Amino acid sequence: MGRFREHLAEQRWDDHRYYHHSLINQSLHFVSAVTFVVAYLLVWNYPWLAALLAWGVSMTTRQAGHFFFEPKGYDHVNQATHDYKEEIKVGYNLARKVVLMGLWALSPLPLLIDPSFFGLFVPHANWMEFLKHLGVIWLFLGIGGLLFRTVQLFFIRDVETGLVWATKIITDPFNDMKLYCRAPAQLLRNLLAWRPATRG
């Protein structure tokens, strides 16, 4: 158990030091984490709504922070290139995230083409039923993405690495809330202190 916790702490530390330099990214991760915790509370009674929140708010804010605000150049703090960090990333690096988010973005199309989703649903009669069906699809996409990478890590790394990574992903919202709770206020202070250059 001690080794498992050490491995978990190591994965969390690598994720933080390599992929969370930007204060904007940290702030977006805090928003994402809070929304994920709300989704965790909802999933027991309203799984479709939890999935809509998790993907529609949590994942979009989280991944926007990585794609648009995190620096991609040489990491002088950790003395590592972006390519090196992408290569050693245990979970979903940016290339794998493109595939995952692409599947998420395209997932409503089959439901629009075939409202029964190949016979799995009673065809939706209104937009609320469409959203409920979409939420179910997104729920299984999230579970599938987690299980796929976990099992993949069993083979390309080892079972412990896969289980540690799965544990990290599931508990990340709680860890991120604690880690980045000050980031939004710091970002706001920086924005308020910023003054555009004026011509004399």
Image: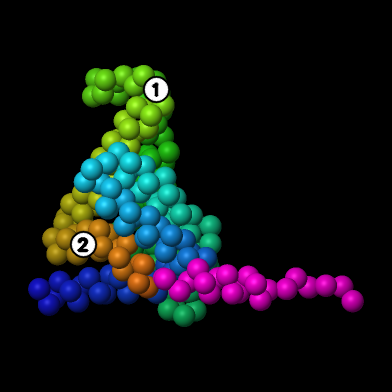
The residue lying at 42 percent from left, 64 percent from top is 30
Closer to the eye: label 2 or 1: 1
Q: Position of residue 6 (x, y in %)?
A: 19, 76
| Secondary structure type for disc 1 | loop
Residue 126, which numbered label? 1
Q: Position of residue 106 (x, y in %)?
A: 41, 34
Residue 167, which numbered label? 2
Q: How many marks?
A: 2
Residue that sits furthest to the front in the current view: 45
Residue that sits furthest to the left in the current view: 1
Front residue of this view, candidates 51 and 15: 51
Quadrant of res 140: top left
Residue 188 part of the magenta-drawn span: yes
Q: Quadrant of the N terminus?
A: bottom left
Label 2 or label 1, whichever comes before in sequence order: 1
Q: Position of residue 99 (x, y in %)?
A: 38, 45
Give the residues in magenta.
180-200
State the separation of the CA atoms marked 2 and 1.
37 Å
